[in-house]
């Protein structure tokens, strides 16, 4: 069976991809053969723009949207000779932690059995880049382009033909009753890695969307420091927290991908500057003095959440004991009091940012346009009502409230204060300097190197049970959110079927990677 046929067959069972790319006939740039990623394959979450196929964010709103430009991540990976095989399914606009809120139906978990196909067939789509603009993303009328350039790239991709009920919801009748949610929102990326369809996958992590699905699929999932990998071309959910994450079964692959993408980008105003990166690199060289010494590992008492299952608690202790026995670590109990308030602070901030970011989708400039519009009310109201799912609408409403004159002081400002306090508390416990803070503000010479805490409070729920009620669903993010609010580099590793996070100070991505390699 060809590689493409295999991917299509597996996808029929697990519903991983929103589109599968036909293998490229264009030879890869010969310079790429020097790259450590040469000849690898990857999948990318469908909220990164690509010119070869639509960028849907798993929403009806963008189901036909084709971007005129590739995201920076895609450009760099293409230059490094890695082949993209498809775009992966996700919670709509990245809002969720189960990949069940996708307009294209749920993705299933790679660790649980699924023998039946969920859908029967694919549609083959062929389009030319002439339909979407030139390679710099500038829209030029096709007649003008025709005159100055000859030949366009012709792309081919495959999309599942899905059955829908009268409300437009996907119907999959044959899901195995043992199937569990794959986690989210980068669930398609995690399942693709879990089932060995690719060497690595790209996801986005705003509050845990790479780490939680990695944890539920027993793979590595790395969320770098905020600002280290360019967000250019990543459709914004909550831009002050959005990061680009990497998933793989091999730490070394994550290392290689991270070092390929770890570049300043003038197209992303929040990308860390070259001087800041240089400072981090110098500190890294200086810290080599500590090689051979034990890592000081902080365990925040606030992470002993009531919701944490007994099994995970025991496994956490076992992991720490194992590392102690191997003389790798020394354990220090620490306190980060604001962890307790992180979940409500996060949901106030992300919904506020999301309500503002999603206001651009009105069906006129972007996205879905209803055909049965009539009446006096503005047309965008109809478009948005039809094309956004329940969860997206809920968040737009919550965000609008927090940004209104009633909600601003009570919600938004308080949440921002919690975030500021949280960052200060992290700065007090870490030995390394936060790479964006002044030297004199810190540092704690006796501080910790890393923290090790669980990634989730429980095993993934059965897919038939859904993700519990709404607040229960939000609760599943309790372990991953503090690092997102503070922008800290964090790696999910698996131990005894559970996921644990290795967390470093802002800018200490390589320390996290090095430690993960040691534990491996
Ligand atoms: N589950 C969280 C949310 O719904 C995180 C999502 C993400 O990281 N994109 O906001």
Image: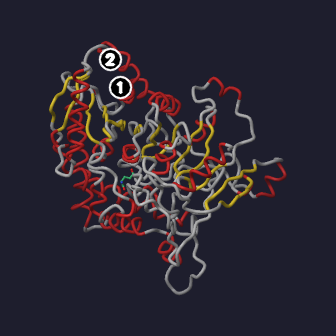
Quarter residue 510 falls in: top left
Which residue is depicted at the point 15% across and 40% down? 301
Which residue is depicted at the point 40% across and 58% down? 95
Q: Nearer the viewer, residue 206 or 38?
A: 38
- Can you give x and y, in whole percent of width and height, for residue 361 in the image? 51, 65
The residue carrying mark 1 is 511
Q: Residues within 10 Å of mark 1 (few under 14, many from 20)?
A: some
The residue carrying mark 2 is 287
- Can you give x and y, in whole percent of width and height, for residue 358 in the image? 46, 62
Q: Secondary structure at mark 2?
A: helix
Q: Which mark is residue 173?
A: none
Does residue 275 appear to the left or right of 322 in the view shown?
A: right
Which image quadrant: the N terminus? top right
Q: Secondary structure at mark 1?
A: helix
Residue situated furthest front in the rendering = 115
Which residue is depicted at the point 58% across and 72% down? 369
- Can you give x and y, in whole percent of width and height, for residue 392 in the image? 41, 65
Which residue is depicted at the point 51% across and 59% down? 58
Does residue 14 appear to the left or right of 440 in the view shown?
A: right
| Residue 390, above or below 273 | below
Ligand 1 within 8 A of label 2's CB? no
User: Is mark 2 in CB contact (under 8 Å) with mark 1?
Assistant: yes
| Residue 92, above or below 202 | below
Label 2, label 1: how far apart the Cα atoms are: 10 Å
Mark whose residue sits in front, 2 or 1 = 1
């Amino acid at each position: 069976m060809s590689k493409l046929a295999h991917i299509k067959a597996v996808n029929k069972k697990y519903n991983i991809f929103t589109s599968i790319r036909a293998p490229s006939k264009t030879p890869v740039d010969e310079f790429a053969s020097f790259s450590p990623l040469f000849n690898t394959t990857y999948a990318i979450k469908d909220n990164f723009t690509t010119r070869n196929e639509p960028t849907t964010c798993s929403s009806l709103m963008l189901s036909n949207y084709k971007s005129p430009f590739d995201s920076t991540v895609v450009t760099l990976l293409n230059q490094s000779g890695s082949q993209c095989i498809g775009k992966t399914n996700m919670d709509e606009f990245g809002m969720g932690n189960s990949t069940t809120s996708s307009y294209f139906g749920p993705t299933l978990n790679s660790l649980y059995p699924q023998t039946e196909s969920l859908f029967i067939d694919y549609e083959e789509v062929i389009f030319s880049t002439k339909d979407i603009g030139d390679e710099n993303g500038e829209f030029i009328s096709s007649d003008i382009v025709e005159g100055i350039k000859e030949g366009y790239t012709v792309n081919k991709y495959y999309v599942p033909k899905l059955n829908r009920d009268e409300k437009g919801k996907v119907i999959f009748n044959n899901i195995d009753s043992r199937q569990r949610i794959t986690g989210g929102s980068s669930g398609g990326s995690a399942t693709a890695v879990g089932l060995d369809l690719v060497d690595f996958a790209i996801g986005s992590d705003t509050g845990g969307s790479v780490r939680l699905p990695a944890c539920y699929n027993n793979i590595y999932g790395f969320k770098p420091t905020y600002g280290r990998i360019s967000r250019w071309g990543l459709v914004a959910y909550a831009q002050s927290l959005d990061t680009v994450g990497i998933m793989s079964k091999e730490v070394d692959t994550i290392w290689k991908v991270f070092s390929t993408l770890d570049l300043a980008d003038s197209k992303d105003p929040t990308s860390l500057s070259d001087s800041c990166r240089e400072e981090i690199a110098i500190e890294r060289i200086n810290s080599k003095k500590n090689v051979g010494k034990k890592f000081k590992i902080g365990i925040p008492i606030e992470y002993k959440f009531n919701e944490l299952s007994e099994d995970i608690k025991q496994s956490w202790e076992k992991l720490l004991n194992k590392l102690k026995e191997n003389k790798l670590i020394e354990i220090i109990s620490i306190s980060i009091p604001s962890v307790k308030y992180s979940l409500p602070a996060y949901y106030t901030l992300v919904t506020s940012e999301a309500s503002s970011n999603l206001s651009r989708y009105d069906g006129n400039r972007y996205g879905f346009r209803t055909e049965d519009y009539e009446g006096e009310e503005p047309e965008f109201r109809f478009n948005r009502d039809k094309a956004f799912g329940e969860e997206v609408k809920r968040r737009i409403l919550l965000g609008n409230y927090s940004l209104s004159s009633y909600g601003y002081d009570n919600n938004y400002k308080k949440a921002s204060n919690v975030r500021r306090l949280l960052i200060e508390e992290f700065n007090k416990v870490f030995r390394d300097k936060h790479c964006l803070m002044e030297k004199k503000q810190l540092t704690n010479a006796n501080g910790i190197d890393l923290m090790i805490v669980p990634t989730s409070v429980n095993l993934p729920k059965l897919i038939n049970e859904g993700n519990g009620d709404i607040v229960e669903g939000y609760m599943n993010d309790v372990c991953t959110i503090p690092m997102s609010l503070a922008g800290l580099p964090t790696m999910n590793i698996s131990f005894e079927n559970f996921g644990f996070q290795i967390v470093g100070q802002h800018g200490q991505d390589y320390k996290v990677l090095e430690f993960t390699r040691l534990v491996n």
